[in-house]
Amino acid sequence: MTTPGTRPAHADLASYIDHTLLKPDARPEEVETLCSEAVEFGFKAVCVNPIFVPLVTACLKGSAVDPCAVICFPFGADPTPIKVAEAAWVVEHGAREVDMVIPIGLLRSGEHSAVRDDIAAVKEACGDALLKVIIETALLTDAQKETACRLSKEAGADFVKTSTGFAGGGATVEDVALMRRVVGPEMGVKASGGVRTTEDARRMIAAGATRIGASSGIAIIGAA
């Protein structure tokens, strides 16, 4: 992994990208194409909804690309036992990375212990799989973003992630920089939502992102 804050060479840019398809009307054949593209271009992971994890696992078998699943997406408003069960299911079916959404309303109401415990329970269910915590920056104040990052770190998460892309806003350089400052060098930061060009991706990486979530991965590295 490139040191946070540095600009990767063109050949390395693909290794930052989670090749993503989260549309509610996504079809299996589109997911198969997504996997083929990820292998061809050397993306880091393929990120899909849970129903497609077995398919992605099969398609990526023998490759260096990781299956990644979102859980309790896009609202994060499910009870913790549901999140735990979903995380356990996707890991059992091959996911090596899990992207969860925090209970945003609880964070905004100041129920910090509940948010921390929610993340920690999912992390335990993930086992050896990486856990990325989506804090949904578009819905939070800067102080709430800082709190969400701190709670994620305390709960043992591996990454914090900006956005679902379903809440009217995506990643910004300012938010990525804030998140990197709060979590320090020990955790990953994933910029997701609205990253569509090579320059977008490089700006996020320069601000501290170590992963880019995008449905435009081919365009991003094609321009590079």
Image (spheres, rainbow, N blue to C red):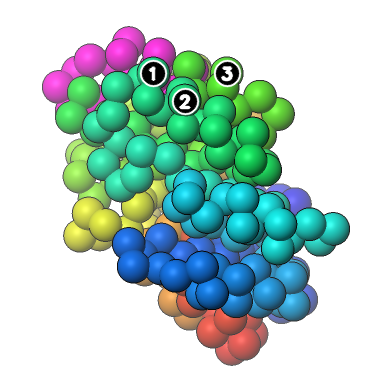
Q: CA distance from mark 2 to mark 3?
A: 11 Å
Report if residue 201 is visible in the image.
no
**Of circles 1 and 3, which is in front?**
1
Q: Where is residue 204 drawn, in percent x and y?
A: 50, 62
Q: In the rendered view of the protein, which quadrant contains the C terminus? A: bottom right
In the image: residue 133, left or right of residue 130? left
Residue located 55% across and 33% down the image:
89
Q: Looking at the image, tell me whether mark 1 or mark 3 is earlier in sequence order.
A: 1
Residue extent of the magenta highlight: 107-120
For the image shown, how many numbered marks are present on the structure?
A: 3
Query: Which SS class for mark 2?
Result: helix
Asked if residue 76 can be seen in this view, the reply is yes
Left or right of 217 in this view: 26: left
Q: Is residue 214 above or below residue 50?
A: below
Q: Position of residue 162 (x, y in %)?
A: 39, 48
Is mark 1 in CB contact (under 8 Å) with mark 2?
Answer: yes
Above or below residue 124? Residue 200 is below
Front residue of 143 and 165: 165
| Residue at x 54% of width, y 74% of height | 29
* Residue annotated with mark 2: 85
Q: Dividing the picture into quarters, in which one does residue 217 lie? A: bottom right
- Give the percent coordinates (x, y) of residue 193: 37, 62
**Callout 1: helix, strand or loop?**
helix
For residue 124, which numbered disc appears in the image? 3
Specify the amino acid type for callout 3: Glu
Residue that carries the numbered disc 1 in the rendered image: 81
Q: Quadrant of residue 96?
A: top right
Return the disc, 2 or 3, that comes first in the chain's sequence. Answer: 2
Q: What residue is drawn where x is 60% and y is 71%? A: 32
Inspect the image, locate mark 1, and give the three-letter code of the amino acid beneath it.
Pro
Distance from Cα at disc 1 to Cα at disc 2:
6 Å
